Image (cartoon, rainbow, N blue to C red):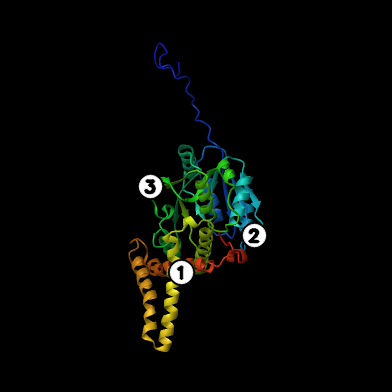
Amino acid sequence: MVGDISPQGAGRIGPVSLNPPARPGVSVFLAVRNEAENLAAAVERIYAQDYGGPFEVVMAVGPSNDDTQAQAESLAEHYDSLTVVANPSGGTPQGLNLAWRAAKFDYLVRVDGHSMLPPGYISQAVALLERTRAANVGGMMVPEGNSPFQRAVAVAMSSPYGIGSESFHTGGEPGPARTVYLGNYRRADLEAVGGFNEEFTRAQDWELNHRLIQAGKTVWFDPSLSVVYRPRASWRELAAQFYRTGQWRCHVIKRYPRTVSARYLAPPLVTAVIGLGLGLGLAGLVRRSGGLTLALTFPGLYALGVVGVAASARDNLDRAAKRLLPLVLATMHLAWGAGFLRALPDGWLKRHQPSDGPI
């Protein structure tokens, strides 16, 4: 008799099922705009997952300057379980809300149009949600570039000297965290806090995690949930990305003053000091004033510091990328700082909503 481990029936455990328990349904959701370069590869990675339960993809597509819409429609024809919904505003939080609310399953896995899921990601995310009972589980963003410029950006984004020391950038031990990359949720938890705040064109993931924690829920970081991210491919795109991020970090601090930290204030402070030093120093050169010219010391020291950090970068970075790294670091710092300073005047963001651009 199956399950009877003694002649007398002592220790009877009942019939053993040969079929594993059914896995919960999963809806992968994403908001895309101007993602023609990476979208097909990102979706292919989603469908290469080995998840053993019901599965769908819901993609909210915003107005784009490339053929993102055509690619999305082509992918929906190829994959029966992929649904495309319109995101007329083009905003990231609006698109994410449209996508997850159109989804039919209770487990929700967020993906970006330029993120590449590794094998087993969804299975592991569901297992972590079930084990930790967290409202959101997520892991690390692992930037990988194809060009020397992108490889330099990838190193900078993985360094505490480039984008800060949050665990989803630099790594750490599994456990509760303030925020994680992307995110894997239960529908009930998203509904409980109202989903993504559509006021936050940027930083909407951080802001959502902050509200989840305020509601007494847990955001869980696990470095094994690593997802490849394709960095911006040009100086202009990189500067615009970090300028907008600086703007919205200022907005976040205004909304949640207790979240301010030295890490967030360092870029605008450095940017202001460098700008002041350059202005006074150049005026000193014109006026032949030694005192004013000394102000050039500040941007000079910053330049030396950036070069020193770049020189200590990992040895496997190719020579072309390593030469670009100091300028990449400076672009990230100063664009972020300039965006923060520009957004300081009260009400500026309401009058000048920055273009969302590629997510």
Mark 1 nearby-residue class (10 Å; few <14, some 14–19, many ≥20): many
Q: Residue at x 47, y 19 (%)?
A: 14
Q: Residue furthest top?
A: 8
**What percent of the width, then of the height, locates residue 62?**
63, 57
Q: Are the two marked residues, 1 and 3, in contact with CB atoms closer than 8 angstroms?
A: no
The residue to which callout 2 is attached is 63
Q: Amino acid at mark 1?
A: Leu
Disc 1, SS: helix
Q: Which mark is residue 334?
A: 1
Q: Is residue 174 rendered to the left or right of residue 36?
A: left
Residue closer to the observer: 252 or 80: 252
Q: Check the picture and name the quadrant holding the C terminus.
A: bottom right
Disc 3, SS: loop
Q: Is residue 248 rendered to the left or right of residue 275?
A: right
Q: Are the two marked residues, 2 and 3, in contact with CB atoms closer than 8 angstroms?
A: no
Mark 1 vs mark 2, foreground winner is: 1
Mark 2 nearby-residue class (10 Å; few <14, some 14–19, many ≥20): some
In the rendered image, which quarter is residue 251 located in?
bottom right
Residue closer to the observer: 250 or 72: 250
Query: How far, Cα to Cα, is label 1 from label 2?
Result: 30 Å
Q: Which mark is residue 173?
A: 3
Q: Earlier in the sequence, mark 1 or mark 3?
A: 3
Mark 3 nearby-residue class (10 Å; few <14, some 14–19, many ≥20): few
Residue closer to the observer: 245 or 61: 245
**What percent of the width, then of the height, locates residue 202?**
55, 58
Q: Amino acid at mark 2?
A: Pro
Query: How far, Cα to Cα, is label 1 from label 3?
Result: 30 Å
Query: How far, Cα to Cα, is label 2 from label 3?
Result: 39 Å
Q: Earlier in the sequence, mark 1 or mark 2?
A: 2
